[in-house]
Image (spheres, coloured by chain):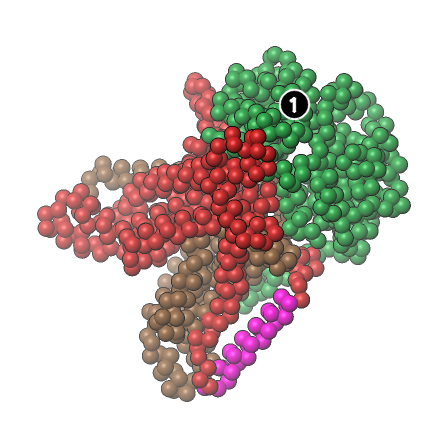
Amino acid sequence: MRYNVSLPWWAYAVMGLGLAVFIGLVGLSIRRNHGIKRSLFSAPYTMWMILFTILPCILIAYYAFTDTAGNFTLDNFRTFWDSNSEMKKLVGEEYAASIPRGTVNVDTLVYSLWMAFLCTVISLLLGYPAALFMADRQMKLGASIVVLFVIPMWMNFLLRTIAWMSLLEDNGLINMMLNAMGFKSVRLMYNSGAVLLGMVYNYLPFMVFPIYTSLSKQNPSLHEAAADLGCSPMQTLTKVTMPLSLPGVISGITMVFMPSVTTFFIPRVLGGGNTMMFGDLIESKFLTEGNWNGGSALSLIMMLLILISLSILRKADPNGEGSGIV
Amino acid sequence: MKKTICLFLSLVLLLPVIALPAFADGVVNVFNWEDYIDESVLQDFEAETGIRVNYMRFTTNEDMMVQVEANPGAFDVVFPSDYMVERMLNKGLLEEINYDHIPNIQYIMESLRDPAYDPKGAHSIPYMWGTVGILYNTEKVTEPVESWGILWDEKYAGDVFMLDSIRDSMGITLKYLGYPMNTRDFSQLREAADLLIAQKKSGVVKAYQVDETKDKMVAGEAALALVWSGDAQYAIDLNPALAYAVPKEGSNIWIDPMVIIKDARNLENAEKFVNFLCRPDIAQRNCEEIWYSSPNAAAIELMGEEYTENPVMNPSEETIASCEFFTDIPENFLPVYTTLWNEVKNAK
Amino acid sequence: MSKISRFFKRFYLGFILVFLYVPIIVLIVQSFNAGKSRAKWEGFSFHWYQELFKSVSIMNALQVTITVAVIAMIVSTILGTLAAIGIYSMKKRQQSIMMTLTNLPNTMPDIVTGISLMLLFIFTKVDRGYFTMLLAHITFDTPYVILSVMPKLKQMNKHTYEAALDLGATPGYALLHVLIPECRQGIVTGAMLAFTLSLDDFTISYFTTSPLVQNLSTLIYSATRRGIEPTLNALSALMFIALLVLLLIVNRRTKESD
């Protein structure tokens, strides 16, 4: 075989056993009316989830709370709070006292949250009007406009991001145009601005679609009724249309905020490694330092943060109406 | 309709089987740096021996080490740098080389066969060597490049590429400060890290990157860049306005050897592969593709003046004397390095 | 609606679309550039397209991407459809537990999913490669299938299935001839979603494969670290055009069937 498929023997045993049990169950339920419950159909999925979602999550927690020898420790979280704590132990007493608390990890987290927040706000400001106009029945745009928004997303997102490089570089297209018009070149790449641009570019459609869906589901007679009752178009917009589209907005916020906190490709390409984000930090903990324990602690912290912010958002949209996407 | 879908799906599923080429004599799994070989050499090796080469690439020594430790069975031949060989030896990751199977060792320079990182070359065979220096664009930099200090000169704000590689960037800063490159003195390291942070905060650094730098320098994206000598020669070849210098404070000189991973799954094929790369004509082709310095005396003879007259590939005795080798930072001190480097990378 | 406001709305949508399309157009134009440089136009040529088909690593990656996407789609569709039917017939409490579980991967960032699976494979000493990447893809695809099949099941008339049983159908027969046809649309949507998600995935593949087995995304990632690779422009142009053609065909077909 050209691909690596060598597995330990027990993996084959578990898989074979699971398959046999499942086929047996389905066969039984098909053969006769035997009282085997249909709910058993979800058994393979449940097993799969336990193996490949729950167990891995437990592993992250396990690594986060242990050291390389496998003993329980809180050091990984201490390192998150004080990135110099490990260094202090190693440099000897004469220096240890002079080393202040290292804020690298916390700063990066704060910076990532701030960038993700900016990206979400900009996407919302740009995306809401777009969704509103798309859903506007008087514009007679139909489904084709949605397709036009979907097509760019089919392009591999790494390639789309790289394409921005050729626009933003010092000798890139934008600067060439500026030069042709007699302006001086501007430094567009390798800064937070470029990273933000790349994030908004990639995640804007995730904001537009849910809002569009919830807007186009609204009953037009509601707007007519509002107008009949004396609302100006502006009032109809702020008092009727906008509140009703809240589930879409919330779903859009989630779908933009989450990937933008964790992205590590965009800052690396457009930020030139100058602007590290939390995703970068986690990636380099794992794949450059090979520090499973420290990296797991950072991942756990990020997971918790995201779960907390999601549950806050859920409060604003208790029925989860906005979750129907695309 | 249903039938066509089924046909299409089964065809797609058959793809991997069809594309399986007939390599009767097995495979060799090679893990090498990005852009570090003439890839047609791999095809020649396959044609001559019937062994299939699974060729994989890495960007920095540290990335490579993580992969090898997490996936030891996946690699047979690896190309770590000198100090990494030391670390891999300490971790017992390397197979002792059986020189009876590698007759082409005779072409490798005598002087490089007993390196400090691997006494008597028992576990490694030199593949390339080179220096770290400054690649600069003579259209943008008119003054002579003599000191590392030019990388801190605010005249070149936003015009300097640094290496996103912990030992290289820290190392040259230590050299600039006049400290030894392998220091474990915390105050010296602290000073170096602070200097790098100051460099970043002053806006001199345009980006931290590794393999992207050479093409961007060719395109004139920056005035100065910290690079490895081969990348410099590659860029100079494509853009004659570029030049390379090793500053007077001295720099890092390194050797990248080939090693065989302990209990390699394809030991015999790995030996054949290593032996093949030591053959003079093959070493010459690789050298002329990537422009690093060759440890292969016979290959250098084949290349003649093109090699010997080139100061980038064949640096002067004086330059070599001013340079230092990296030695490995032991695991109980490494976190100091990584913590300081993280601070540099995260400075805003 | 006044002309001005209509013009403004069209202008605004046009502006957003330009923003979305400009980089893609730039990529396509560059794929015909004879030179390697991104900055200079050195004449029109198909050079990079020829290089593309000659490149073994890109063709390998294409093959890995497509086979993984197809196999992951098939497995996750079967797994997900059965699971949806199972969950649907559970009691209320069990059902909500299962749905929370199903939603869990959606609320986890990709990087955490990828890392957690990588830790699993390292912990169990399974060599990462094609197989592990496939497992990962099935894992993140399946919940999407369930989420698209579930609503169709809920819309269905509950009594249809029981009626089929009363009329003498075995549960298996009823499954194949009543339940699955009823939610066919949801299954197809789920399968399509699974296919596109796995085609487009970078982060999870990046952590669950070895350097040997690369799909297009991880290949592109390592290529960006290497420098300029105009063959990738050619590849993206081709992929873009293929998708456009596919879209047009689907559109025409749906119109004909109307």
Q: Which chain is brown?
A: C
- Residue at position x 23%, y 48% from top? A242
Q: Nearer the viewer, residue C221 or B151?
A: B151
Task: Please tell me whether residue A138 is drawn above or below residue B292 in the rendered image.
Answer: below
From the viewer's perspective, is B339 left or right of B21?
A: left
Determine the image quadrant of residue A233. top left
Q: Nearer the viewer, residue C154 or C207?
A: C207
Q: Position of residue C254 (x, y in %)?
A: 40, 60
Q: Which chain is green?
A: B
> In the image, is residue A14 part of the stretch drawn in magenta?
yes
- Residue at position x 43%, y 19% from top? A183
Task: Please tell me whether residue A266 is drawn above or below residue A187 in the rendered image.
Answer: below
Mark count: 1
- Residue at position x 67%, y 18% from top? B249
Q: Which chain is red?
A: A
Residue kind at label 1, given as amino acid type: Tyr
> In the image, is residue B314 part of the stretch drawn in magenta?
no
Q: Position of residue C182 (x, y in %)?
A: 39, 72
Q: Which residues are magenta?
A: A10-33
Q: Which residue is mark 1?
A: B179
Residue A45 visible in the displayed image? yes
Q: Nearer the viewer, residue C191 or A197?
A: A197
From the viewer's perspective, is B77 left or right of A44?
A: right
- Residue at position x 70%, y 53% from top? B73
